[in-house]
Amino acid sequence: MSDPVLMGPGPSNPYPEVMAALGRPLLGHLDPEFLALLDETGDRLRAVFRTTNPLTLPISGTGSAGMEASFVNVVRPGDVVVVGVNGLFGERMCDVASRCRAEVVRVDADWGAPIDPSRLLAAHPSPAVIAVVHAETSTGVRNDIEELGAGKGDALLLVDCVTSLGGIPVEVDAWGIDIAYAGTQKCLGVPPGLAPMTVSERARERLVAKPQSWYLDLGMISRYLDSGARTYHHTAPISMVYALHAGLGVVLDEGLERAWARHRECGGALQAGLEKLGLELFAAEGHRLPQLTSVLAPVGVDEKEVRARLLAGGIEIGGGLGPLAGRGWRIGCMGHTARARNVTLLLAALGEVLA
């Protein structure tokens, strides 16, 4: 069997340029050549995040490390943190904020529905942080961000961009986002292992002096980045930085707008094809992600058996979470995987299995 086409909610197929980068000979983490490549990776991240924030870097760890780094560095005990929850990753934000001993104010919406930004802004008169997931991986729903940035007041706006960065517009500076983190394995077409992150100067002024995590202490990491002598903090994952540098290069060579358009066209074709098969889409119309589609299985169909039969033929899709668990699938169309041929292959295979 050939390598599977990964169309689940997890890692997408990596770009060929990324696989080549992973095979490069290793350098020391303080080697001048590697430090130059790390600086260039930061420049590329700024371009993809659409920001000029000096503190823009890949955190050593997956997207979950980006989430934890974001909260532990700006949340103090007793701080009010407003969190939008309409899926699994909003729930995780609440968990991480509570571990920072914040007063968590939840704003809930049904799984599959977007969160009304006005409800987040009205949830508390003076929160320290407003946090929300831009692209909720558990449901395939896009939450609107721009209105939050315009109305946040003195609060810091913290946004999970794990599934959105590189696939749909993310405008950190234009939308007033103070802290954003992402993952490498979604629309950037890079294996998991790093969490791209950007921090505004406004948020940097509010960094906790000694956060509960030493490893994720942005104050120490930023001193490392700012120092001409590169004061040692931790050993960087050299090969993963190579891979991210290459993946960002592919995205920027294609052009962000063209990458967004490719995801939009492939996701639209996938969703239209699923509906032609008689399947019901789970996420609310008008807020469906093109790169992550949630869909209900027909009544009486064993969704696990469908996934197993597809995987035996070389196509991997993901199962549902929360209200979608056991009832449907989450189908990724992101990064290198977002190609018309993959959409055609998946729809033909799924139609054959369901028939």
Image (cartoon, helix red, strand yellow):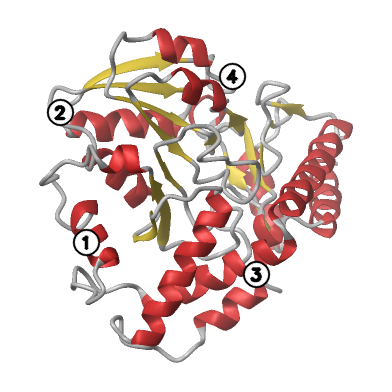
Q: Which mark is residue 15?
A: 3
Q: Is mark 4 on a helix, strand or loop?
A: loop
Q: Which residue is drawn at 51% across and 68% down?
A: 244
> For numbered disc 2, what is the local secondary structure?
loop
User: What amino acid is labelled 3 in the image?
Assistant: Tyr
Instruction: Answer with left or right where residue 259 lies relative to residue 140.
Output: right
Asked if one can make out residue 5 in the rendered structure from this viewpoint, the answer is: no
The vertical placement of 30 against 92, above or below, is below
Where residue 310 sits in the image (x, y, percent)?
Answer: 71, 54
Question: What element does badge 3 sit on?
Answer: loop
Against 170, residue 95 (above or below) is above
Q: Of marks 3 and 2, which one's residue comes earlier in the chain?
A: 3
**Residue type indicated by callout 4:** Ala
Residue hosting label 1: 223
Q: Residue 101 carries which label?
A: 2
Choose mark 2 or mark 4, whichever is in front: 2
Secondary-structure class at tag 1: helix
Earlier residue among tags 2 and 1: 2
- Sequence-first tag of 3 and 4: 3
Label 3 – label 4 distance at C-alpha: 32 Å
Circle 1 packing at 10 Å, graded few (<14), some (14-19), many (20+), is some
Residue 41: x %, y % from top left: 48, 68
Q: Distance between the residues labelled 1 and 4?
A: 41 Å
Q: What's under tag 2, amino acid-wise? A: Arg
